[in-house]
Image (cartoon, helix red, strand yellow):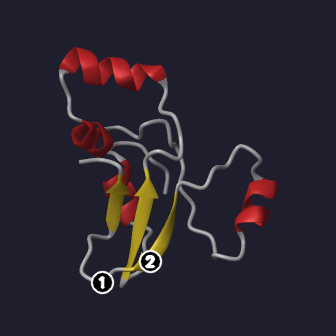
Amino acid sequence: AHITGGGLPENVERIVPDGLSAIIDTASWEPLPIFGRIARDGAISASEMFRVFNMGIGLVAIVPAEAPAAAQSAVPTAIIIGQIEARDGREAVTLRGVA
């Protein structure tokens, strides 16, 4: 998912297969300082920041569980930001670490 015009949950939801949920660990990367400034100066909650902005993640790819090394080899700047699990009543996207 190309993360523009909306935050991570809305954009990632479009690529999550039915019956599954993307669990994104928001501590797995450091957002650019501009996002901290926007949140601070605008008194914007973390959940709203992730809903509106990409928080520095411009592209999300879902790869097979056995393939992260190959993906990172192909794109050396790639980072693992979460995993895919059975939905089990959860939303299509869960942001771990955001209240």
Q: Nearer the viewer, residue 1 or 99?
A: 99
Q: Position of residue 17 (x, y in %)?
A: 43, 79
User: Tag 1, which secondary structure?
Assistant: loop
Is 67 placed left or right of 96 in the picture?
A: right
Q: Position of residue 55 (x, y in %)?
A: 42, 37
Q: Residue at x 34, y 42 (%)?
A: 5
Q: Position of residue 38 (x, y in %)?
A: 30, 21
- Say whether marks 2 and 1 touch (CB < 8 Å): yes
Q: How many marks?
A: 2
Q: Residue at x 72, y 71 (%)?
A: 67
What residue did someone put label 2 on?
A: 85
What residue did someone put label 1 on?
A: 88
Q: Residue at x 36, y 23 (%)?
A: 36
Q: Amino acid at mark 2?
A: Glu
Q: Position of residue 85 (x, y in %)?
A: 44, 77
Q: Nearer the viewer, residue 43 or 60?
A: 43
In this view, which residue lies farthest toward the left? 43
Q: Which mark is residue 47?
A: none
Q: Cα distance, mark 2 to mark 1?
A: 9 Å
Is 58 placed left or right of 97 in the picture?
A: right
User: Tag 2, which secondary structure?
Assistant: strand
Q: Residue at x 52, y 43 (%)?
A: 58
Q: Nearer the viewer, residue 73 or 10?
A: 73
- The image quarter in which residue 54 lies: top left
The answer to whether residue 47 is above or below residue 94 is above
Disc 2 crowd rating (10 Å Cα; few below 14, some 14-19, many 20+) is: few
Disc 1 crowd rating (10 Å Cα; few below 14, some 14-19, many 20+) is: few
Q: Amino acid at mark 1?
A: Asp
The answer to whether residue 53 is above or below residue 65 is above
The answer to whether residue 67 is above or below residue 41 is below
The answer to whether residue 76 is above or below residue 66 is above
Is 63 placed left or right of 24 in the picture?
A: right
